[in-house]
Amino acid sequence: MALYRRGKTWWYVFEFGGRRIQESSGFRNKTAALRAEAKRKTDLFERRAGLKKLKQAPKFGDFVEQFLRWSQQQHRPKTHELHSGNCETLKRFFRGIWLDEVSQGMVGDFKLTRIKEKRWGERDEIAVSGVTVNRALSTLRLIYNFAERCGFAVSNPVKHVTFFREPGRTRIISLEEERAYLGATSQPLRDIARIILDTGMRPEEVFRIETANLDFGQRTIFNPFGKTAAAKRKLTMTDDVWSILKKRAVLSESPYIFSSPDKPEKPIGSVRKAHDAAIRRAKIAPGFRLYDLRHTYASRAVMAGVDLPTLAALLGHTSVHMTMRYVHPAEEHKREAATKIERFKTESAIELATRSQGVTTKVTTVERVQ
């Protein structure tokens, strides 16, 4: 047993079950620190003796591998890929630490350290964004939720950590921006963007379109997968989409319309570099995400008179409430709405004045008759 001071606080260090336990007691008083150490040892002994039915937690790095195997079975490929990348970052900070030793303070330190790091962009160093840190914190929270379900004696250290504020990301592009963007895109991004704008499909759904799921006679696309049952749906092709898919289906030697350049037996994985390059060439500011083309489709559909239940089915949503999050009128439509309201007020005032004038004329006529 060893007790020592670091600053004004007493720390204890001892070995238990092959583990070196070195922690702050949280007290400045030595007697209180001794009691905290004794309690920590009692908790560890009760867990080891089976008096507490929770399993002893493994090291963070070891458990992350178990989490990723579970994630691969439970999550979509893109989601699993996101968790895998986040886990590599988390292991840099928490490798070698036991899972039950990661505290809220450690997570706070990770958050503040990570936001100061740099990542390499295409041309220069770019600071890590708050959104990137938040995604890593979300993965860490999910790791601990999974650990609790596995029966390990852990408390989720992310529970009371405040995430960075994220700016509103939804963006509706105008017809002028659409024209400039499509004029600056390369293939296959141009065709992918056109399909999203005309059908409202998710980018990943477009990437995974299979020739076998296209019916050119009925002009339909069948999407057989998704996060929910509603995502599995049949969509109607517009003329542009029909032409694009027909041409690509004839030329494709892969099951997929948009196959990976490196592995034709698999769908394309990303067009992010091509998208960012097109935004720069088109000089669109502020820029937008490829996913925002789906938001644009939804808003245009509502403005064209499509009812919300139908739009929810087209987007693959389980409820209209989810669809409402996608509907954002563009500025020109807001101005048009204001003009309509102003016109309504003017017409109502004229009608009221005309009605009042008619009543006055009628009263005057009656008085003259008398």
Image: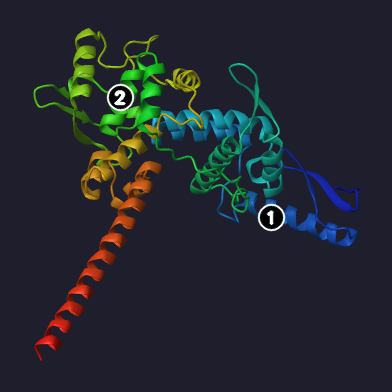
Horizontal and vertical percent for residue 201? Answer: 30, 32
Closer to the observer: label 1 or label 2?
Answer: 2
Q: Is residue 288 above or below residue 367?
A: above
The secondary element bearing badge 1 is classed as helix
Amino acid type, label 1 = Asp
Q: Please tell me in which quadrant of the rendered image residue 344 appears.
A: bottom left
Q: Which residue was labeled with disc 1?
A: 43
Q: Please tell me in which quadrant of the rendered image residue 164 appears.
A: top right
- How many numbered dots are placed on residues in this image? 2
- Neighbor class of circle 1 (other Cα within 10 Å; few <14, some 14-19, many 20+) is some
Horizontal and vertical percent for residue 121? Answer: 60, 20
Q: Earlier in the sequence, mark 1 or mark 2?
A: 1
The answer to whether one can see residue 102 in this image is no
Please name the residue shown 25% across and 10% down the image: 252
The secondary element bearing badge 2 is classed as helix
Q: Which residue was labeled with disc 2?
A: 194
User: In the image shown, does 285 or 1 lie closer to the viewer?
Assistant: 285
User: In the image shown, does 275 or 210 lie closer to the viewer?
Assistant: 275
